[in-house]
Image (cartoon, rainbow, N blue to C red):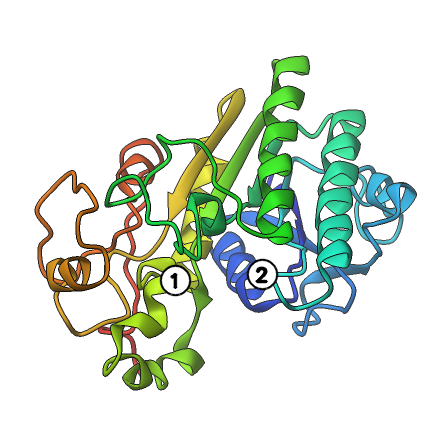
Amino acid sequence: MARRVVVTGGSGKLGRAVVDELRTHGWKPVVVDKVPHPDREVASVVADLRDLGQATEVLAAVDSRFRRVDALVHLAAVPGPGLATNSAIFENNLMTTHNLFTSAVRAGVNTVVWASSETLLGIPFTTPPPYLPVDENYSARPESSYSLAKHLEETMAAEIARWNPDMSLTALRLSNVLDDTDYARFGEHQADAARRRWNLWAYIDTRDGAQAVRKALEHAIPGYRMYVIANADTVMERPTAELVAEQFPGVPTNREFTGNETLLCIDKARRELGYQPTFGWRNTTR
């Protein structure tokens, strides 16, 4: 029997790629969003997840759509700082996540994967990172109301996992989500490395972000875990070592950088999830 997974934010840029990936690999996604999914063959429920009652219902049953949920993928959010007022972003993102985590506990949905953020690594790096490449091994450094909410989401997940030992809660610290329509503008970054210094020139292709979500679902084990998720390269044509020397002189490095390798370390995701980015701006059809 196909496993049913609720995908919040499934009508968005990353959400659509996640739905496609899950359908291809034997999952049965139900999209929960403020707008219906564009593919009418995908089960879709319109809901406001800031309301605890609606969040509870979509993880329990929606009569005409489904009566059992095996997993939750939570992508619904204001997707970055500056897109609304600070208080609106904080309240929307944190309360939506709280409602869904709480509802998952009540509904017995023990597998949860959700979109955390690269911003917890210290973005926009006005204060340089402690070392490069950045990874999961130093404390979160939220620098905005958006990333503060993400930090509290991860803290909440760790405690919910402690309270509920059978639950698996996986945070994916996703980099800047991009797709084919965005790659045509990459030429604008090349003349001035400072333009994309703010996130160490990193990105995640929607299709590789979707792969990471699927693999996190497939490798779910009880407890709370988090992973940095990025593509294996940068948005720049210049070598990574050259960018670091110019923009982050004096920052300690943990390895010698080869070619255009990412400065958002994805070693843990590769090792534990089997994540292996495949797509990107250098090899995609544009």
Q: Quadrant of the N terminus?
A: top right
Q: Which residue is mark 1?
A: 198
Q: Position of residue 97 (x, y in %)?
A: 71, 42
Residue 234 appears in the rendering: yes
Q: Nearer the viewer, residue 187 or 163?
A: 187
Residue 68 appears in the rendering: no
- Distance of label 1 from label 2 (alpha carbons): 25 Å
Q: Position of residue 13 (x, y in %)?
A: 56, 68
Residue 134 placement: quadrant: top left
Q: Position of residue 229 (x, y in %)?
A: 39, 48
Helix, strand or loop under label 2: helix
Neighbours of disc 2 within 10 Å: few (<14), some (14-19), many (20+): many
Q: Which of labels 1 and 2 is toward the front?
A: 1
Residue pictured at 58% horizontal, 34% vertical: 154
Q: Position of residue 230 (x, y in %)?
A: 35, 54
Helix, strand or loop under label 1: helix
Q: Amino acid at mark 1?
A: Trp
What is the number of the mark on residue 127?
none
Q: Is residue 174 left or right of residue 149?
A: left
Residue pictured at 65% horizontal, 44% vertical: 149
Q: Is 176 situated above or below 269? A: below
Q: Which residue is mark 2?
A: 15
The earlier-in-sequence mark between 1 and 2 is 2
